Amino acid sequence: MNKKPIRRISKSQYLKGLQCPLALWYYRHRPDLRPEISKIQQALFDGGHEVGVLAQQYFDRGVEITEPYYQINQAIKSTQKAVAGGESAVFEATACSADGAYSRIDILKRVGPFDVWDLVEVKMSTQVKDYHIDDMALQRYAFYGAGYDIRRSILMHLNNQYVRMGDLNLKELFTLENCTAAVGNRMAEVKGNVAELIYMLNQADEPAIEPGDQCYTPFECDYTGHCIAQGPEFPVQNIFRPGWRLDALLADNIFDVRDIPLGFDATERQRIAIEACRNDQVYTNRSLIDDWLVGLEYPLYFLDYETINPAIPLFDNSRPFQQIPFQFSMHIQKSRGGALGHASFLHTDKGDPRPDFIKYLTGHCGTTGSVIVYNQAFENRINNELGTAFPEYKDALDNISNRMMDLLVPFQSRFIYHPQMNGSASLKSVLPAFVSDVGYDDLAIGEGDTASLMYLQCIKDAVSEQEKEKIYKDLIAYCGMDTLAEVKLLDVLYRSA
Ligand code: SF4
C-alpha cells in the first residue's frame, strides 16, 4: 500500500475506476499485478499517437506542451504560460481541478481572440462511443475546475467515408463532432465519482468486488488473469450470453456447463453444447452435415486472406480502417481424397498490394468448383471492396464470391460440436478440438492480428531486411496453416457424415 495520501487521479485512472474501482485500486497499489504491454497493445498506442500528430496539423498554429505525463505540475504551468502568451491552440494542454481531477487534452483551442476555449479530444475511431463522453466529461471538469472558460467539447475522429487520393487531405480525413450537450448531461456525476474514487484509493484494503460483466466492458480489464484465473473448465459464460439464463445459473452458483441441471431451459444450440460437455462426447447431426456436403463441387479451392486495416489510409482508393488484403493461401483438391495442390501470394514490395493480389487470386482460383472459406462474410466483403476499387476485376471476383462455401456454418450452427470448442466456432478453437496432427502451436505467428502487425512493420521499414525475411516466412507458414486447417476440418465432416 502506498503510504502517501492520494489526492489526484488522471483521466485514464478515472475511466479505469468507472469500469471497476478494484481495477483502479490494483493499478495504484499493486503494480506487480500489471501485465506487460503486448505487441498488439503497443501497436494500438503507436497508431493513436500517429493519429494525434496528424490531428495537430489540422490546425494552422499551436504550441505543444512537451513535459512527460508524470510531470503534472510543470505541464500545468507550461499550459498556463502558453495560454497567457496568446497561443490560439495548445496541444497536450494540462489542467487540474481543486479536488484532484487532472487531465490532458489533445487540443485546447481558443475561440477567436477571446479567453474562451474549445476542448478537442482526438480518438482513433470512426464514431463517438459512450465511454468517450465520460472521457470528455472528466476533461471538461478538470479544465473548468482549473478556471478555464470552456465553450464546447468536441470529439475529433476519423471519417470512414474519406477516400484517399494522393496526399492526405486532413480536412476530409477528420470529422469534428460537437459533443457539448452529451458531455453536459454527464457532468453532474463527475464530482461525486472523483471524490469516491480518491476516497477508495486511500483505503488500505482493496474494495470487495466480484468479477462480472464489467471485466470485459467497455474493455477487457488488465486484471482478468488475476481475478478470474481459477475459472471452471467449461465456463457457462461461453455458452450463455448475458441475460436471464446466465443470471439464473450464476445466482445458483453454477459456473461449469457440466453442472447445469437436467431440464434447464436452454435453446437448441445451448442444449447441444451442454449435452456434449455433460456426456464428454462429440455431438453430430449427420443429416445436416450431409445436406451441407452435398453443396460442394470439385475442384475445391480452400482459401484464406490476410489483411491490414490501417487507421490512416496508406494507399490511394482506400478509406480509414479499410481491410487491405496482402496475402492469400489456397489449397486445391481436384477430387475427394485426391492430392493437395497449393498456391499462395504474399506482397513484399512497397506500395498497394491489391492489384497483384487480385491478379494472382483470379489467376489461380479457376472459374468452377467450390471456394471453401472460414467465415465467408469476411472474404466476401474483401472481394466486394476490391471489385469497387478495381472494377476491371469485378466479374472475376464476383465469380469467386458466388462459389464460396462457408465451412464455419457446420461448426457455428452446431451440426457438429466438440466439448473442447468451449462455445467457440473460431478456426483456432475448432481445429485443436478435432485435429491433433497439425496446429498453430509451433508457428511464430499464430493469429491474424499478429500477422497484420508484423506485415505493417515490414512495409513501414520498422524492422531490418533480415527480420523481414523471417517475418515473410512466418506469414507464409501461418496463412498456409489456415487453409490446411480447412482441409482437415472438411475431412472431419466427411468422416462424421
Ligand atoms: S478483472 Fe473484473 S473484478 Fe477484477 S479488477 Fe478487473 S474488472 Fe474488476
Image: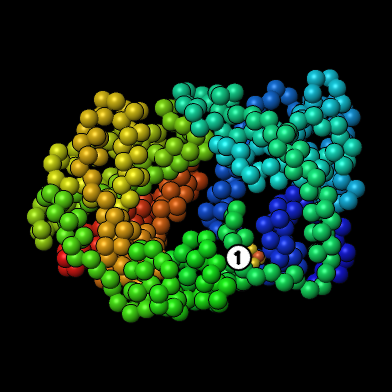
How many badges with numbers are in the image?
1
- Farthest top residue? 113
| Secondary structure state at the residue bearing disc 1 | loop
Picture coordinates of residue 404 (x, y %)?
Answer: 23, 45
Height in image: 2 above or below 190? below
> Could you classify mark 1 by the number of other residues whose Cα lies within 10 Å: few (under 14), some (14-19), or many (20 or more)?
few
For residue 104, say whether it is visible. no
Q: Which quadrant is the N terminus positioned in?
A: bottom right
Amino acid found under the numbered disc labelled 1: Gly
Choose between 299 and 145: the one closer to the eye: 145
Picture coordinates of residue 291 (x, y %)?
Answer: 17, 56
Height in image: 455 above or below 423? above
Query: What residue is drawn where x is 25% and y is 29%?
Result: 393
Q: Which quadrant is the C terminus positioned in?
A: bottom left
Height in image: 258 above or below 118? below
Q: Which image quadrant for residue 267?
A: bottom left
Picture coordinates of residue 84 (x, y %)?
Answer: 89, 29
Residue 463 shown left or right of residue 150 in the figure: left
Residue 20 shown left or right of residue 141 in the figure: left
Query: What residue is drawn where x is 85% and y is 22%?
Result: 114
Residue 251 shown left or right of residue 377 in the figure: right
Mark 1 CB within 8 Å of ligand 1: yes
Choose between 382 and 188: the one closer to the eye: 188
Query: What residue is drawn where x is 47% and y is 46%?
Result: 457
Question: Would you name the residue on which mark 1 appears?
Answer: 212
